[in-house]
Amino acid sequence: MTIDTTPSTHESAPAVADDTSARSLSRRRFLALAGGAGAVGFLGATLGPRAWDVMFGGASDTRGSLGPSDGRRLVLVTLYGGNDGLNTVVPYENPKYASGRGSLALDPSTVLPLGEGYGLHPAMPGLKALWDAKKLAIVQGVGFADPNYSHFESMDIWQSGVTSSSESTGWLGRWLDADGASPLRAVGIGPTTPVLLTGEKVQGASISAGPLVLPGSAPEQALYSSLAGTTMGEALLHSQAAQSNADLLVVDHQLGPILDRTATSNPLHLKGGASNSTAQASGALAIANGGGGLSSPDVLATQLSIVANLILAGSPTDVYSVELGGFDTHADQAPTQTTLLGELSTGVSAFVDALGADPRGRQTVVVVYTEFGRRVTGNASAGSDHGWANVVFVAGDPVRGGWYGDPPSLNTLADGNLVFTTDFRSVYATLFDQILGVDPSTFLQGRFPTMPFV
């Protein structure tokens, strides 16, 4: 099996193209984003024939002793760049909001009311519908003590689950390490394995978005194929490289028909396939990982549709990781955040709706987080600078919708920042306890109170 184990480092990416926030995405079209022949490359770069057999029932046991499975799955959505939570979940009835934010303050008449003086950003009607259906929990004031303003250090803290020292493993990587579980227990969509899925002994599998295309002409491709052959007595590294090549070639032939069959047998599938080519999808995901340029408007929905098709096909994977970049809004925040929050809302709500329509997907929980919030007062470039506490979204059919955690006070700021009231590891402790069925303290280096959002 070829598995990418390179931890990713991210800087924020520029905004995606405009006029996408109100785009409608039906459940059927959503699932179709990863359907058809173009989906071959989404998984083909990382899953070998034995791995694919495991994912669809060909192996006896991949679970190890990491806890019981009741069908619940966790999907983590990482927002890179530091989303402005104060303009995402808006305390629009608090007079300190308008006076503190100045020109960044949203017009109260445009927000989507949630109750208790709060509303969602107007670009998020999909998440508002989940809130109304009691399928969205909002955890307020999430962060950690002694915060800093570095994207890299803050994201490393979130992904490692450790604040007191440098830690190279992720909070879920240590879970994978617990008894040498299969990497297929945790799958990330992207060109590199995020720190959160990185253990000392086991790393989650990474699935690249883009087609598997052998280089060169037909004779050169045949030569490449010959490298997939193994011979008796060859060096270990030669044998491992040959096996990796063989995995790629076999999956190239196997994956397309499997996903085609999955898509056409699904009543939610819309004929016609994805709106973007796989080449565009690959480039867009590289942008989400800090590659620069303008992202495709379907970048998050495409990742989530891959996850949806895997879950609906019966994959034993317990944890999936997807991502969206571009939230470092130091300048011209309003249009950038509107576009990105529109994509987030559209993708997550379509994903929850699609899985909720099938018994194999109803136990899926989506968690959306970012490395830090933004300062309360805007800057001179119509943007906001790095801040501290933020909100976390938890969505899905198993979720007990509503408010969790104490909202940070706008009356008591620290260096112009919202002060955290909920340790982020309480969110993780709840996920370990309620989704993965294990003792959180084993993996979080301490005990943290859980919350009843699931």
Image (spheres, grey):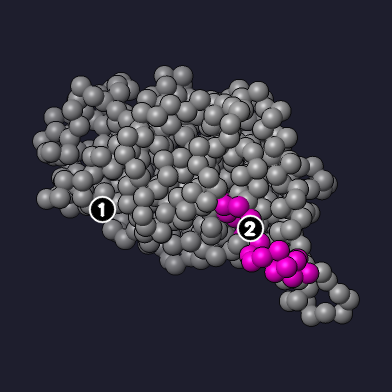
Q: Disc 1 residue type?
A: His
Tell me which residue sits at (30%, 23%) in the image: 112
Q: Residue 399 at what x, y percent from top left?
A: 51, 28
Quadrant in which the N terminus is drawn: bottom right
Q: Name which quarter of the figure residue 231 lies in.
A: bottom right
Tell me which residue sits at (55%, 65%) in the image: 6
Q: Residue 63 at what x, y percent from top left?
A: 73, 47
Q: Do the residues labelled 2 and 1 touch (CB within 8 Å)?
A: no
Q: Which mark is residue 386?
A: 1
The answer for how far apart the CA atoms under marks 2 and 1 are is 41 Å
Q: Which mark is residue 227?
A: none
Tell me which residue sits at (66%, 62%) in the image: 214
Instruction: Give the camera-side residue of 58 and 139.
Output: 58
Q: Disc 2 residue type?
A: Val
Q: From this viewpoint, is residue 145 visible? A: no
Mark 1 crowdedness (10 Å alpha carbons): few <14, some 14-19, many ≥20? many
Q: Residue 213 carries which label?
A: 2
Mark 2 crowdedness (10 Å alpha carbons): few <14, some 14-19, many ≥20? few
- Residue 25 magenta: no
In magenta, the rendered stretch is 201-226
- Report whether 75 appears left or right of 387: right
Q: Residue 342 at what x, y percent from top left?
A: 36, 34
Instruction: Give the camera-side residue of 416 and 75.
Output: 75
- Report whether 301 appears left or right of 420: right
